[in-house]
Image (cartoon, helix red, strand yellow):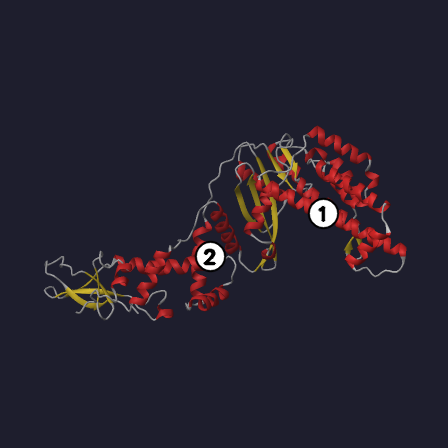
Amino acid sequence: MKLIQPTLYNFASLKILDLFRNNVKISNSRIIHNKRMTCNICGSVCCYNGSSNKGRHALSRSTNSFFQKGQQYCPVCDRTIQVENEWLDNMLDSFNQYLASQIISLSENLSEDEIVKHFERTMSIIISKSTVHNVIKDANEELKNHKFEYEVTDNFYAYDEQYISINGKRAYRLVIFDLKNEKIIYEKIHERFSKKILMHVLREVFGETKPKGFVVDMRLEYPSAFKSVFGKKIKVQFCVFHLNKLILNEYQDCLKVGNKIKWTLIDYYYLYTLFNIFYNRENELKILRKMMDDYSNFKKKLTSEKINHFVKKYKIDIKDKQKLIEKVEDIQEKRLMKKFRNILHDKKNERKRNKETLKVRDVNSAKEIFENVYLRRSIYPEKIRKRIIKIKEKFDYFTASNGEVLTTNKLEGFFGATLKKFRKKCSRCFLSLTSLLKRKRARQEGIEFFKRFTIFELTKMFTAILFLS
């Protein structure tokens, strides 16, 4: 049998494939052999005797390459010996792992049909849909019984559920988040949800351990569920972020004129007096007061020259003098509101850069601010007045943590990172979606369930295909 010998043309390929250090021999017919072995019965040196298989592998269909495993023959014992070939087995395993890692990664965003098309379009790799399905199915089964490690401590935990649709049926993704360690300790999809199921989950996760408290959104059944499990002294903090979102949405509804929302500086000011209850927003209120004063002075000192300046700059075509003045005043107010929004944006980015958060008010300060708001509630729109009354009824739930933690924002961030809003409706089965969420959670915790390939490993793998084609 003639073997492939090193030449100037193939030296680089043999080096990349690590064939100089291995006892691997490749014949001119591309059969992969080990060095000649001695028969374990008679001790004679065996000879090469063709291959034991057709050499098909995961990429054969795409590359027309075959990795045939060589076999040997003992002429004394007259028997064929099947020889193990570690180099070949590792190479074939790399092909399978490469395809599996690509399929599993793509399955987070693509369907099985789309994965097949993606391979063919981008890498000219032809694989069947059944192969893709089996890889995903095996990966899901492997994850099915995987348990994440966690430790329950005397901290505040965030709890929330996310509504999702699986094949048209409503399901509930229940999550408990450790706010101090920023780690998920429970995540599971349930077909149904009730107070009884929530209590069962809490007992399953926490057992006899009693945490410091929980931060939840403003569903009224939560406090009784947590108190039934942990006792009446458990602290249940309503999420202030959810409250502020409700206030903003309700305020916008009150200001709607047709399909447009007509804000004014005074509306901004009233809105931020509400945001100022649990967080210190005095700086924003101070800016708004100054802007309102500036706007008032602008209206008082509005001259013909200023009006003409606005007419030219904004190309206003209004003949009626009073309507023209109103239009100029409206433009100036909008300019001031835009300036305020830009200030808010810059302040928010500055806090992010400095890893700071808004200053939280203590309970006494929040009570004092709220009492003033409550006494002056008649200045707000009707919807907001109703909201203020509801806050008064549940005020203790908004200050239960005494300012230690007020929001479930970190948990909301986890929801957004692992399951985008537009993917809350999907055609996956429960096992598939559960496995997808587990993989995303594992990745966040630094755990991978498929192999990462280096550039060198990919070079070695595709060089082998090219060399043996």
- Residue 350 visible in this rendered orientation of the protein: yes
User: In the picture provided, is 468 more to the left or to the right than 267?
Assistant: left
Q: Nearer the viewer, residue 86 or 5?
A: 5
Q: Residue at x 85, y 46 (%)?
A: 301
**Distance CA(mark 2)–CA(mark 1):** 44 Å
Please rate how many residues cluster around mark 1, counting C-alpha atoms within 10 Å: few if below 14, some from 14 to 19, many from 20. Answer: few
The location of residue 220, given as percent across then percent down, is: 69, 41
Residue carrying label 2 = 105
The location of residue 237, given as percent across then percent down, is: 65, 36
The location of residue 131, given as percent across then percent down, is: 42, 64
Residue carrying label 1 = 339
**Which quadrant would the N terminus be assigned to in this image?**
bottom left
When asked about the image quadrant of residue 73, the answer is bottom left
Q: Residue at x 65, y 31 (%)?
A: 402
**Farthest residue, direction top:** 364
Q: Nearer the viewer, residue 440 or 306?
A: 306
The location of residue 37, given as percent across then percent down, is: 15, 59
Q: What is the number of the mark on residue 239?
A: none
Answer above or below: position of 226 versus 435: above
Q: Which amino acid type is marked by label 1? A: Lys
Q: Residue at x 53, y 40 (%)?
A: 182
Answer above or below: position of 59 versus 188: below
Q: Secondary structure at mark 1?
A: helix
Q: Nearer the viewer, residue 27 or 215?
A: 27
User: In the picture provided, is 441 more to the left or to the right than 307?
Assistant: left
Please rate how many residues cluster around mark 2, counting C-alpha atoms within 10 Å: few if below 14, some from 14 to 19, many from 20. Answer: some
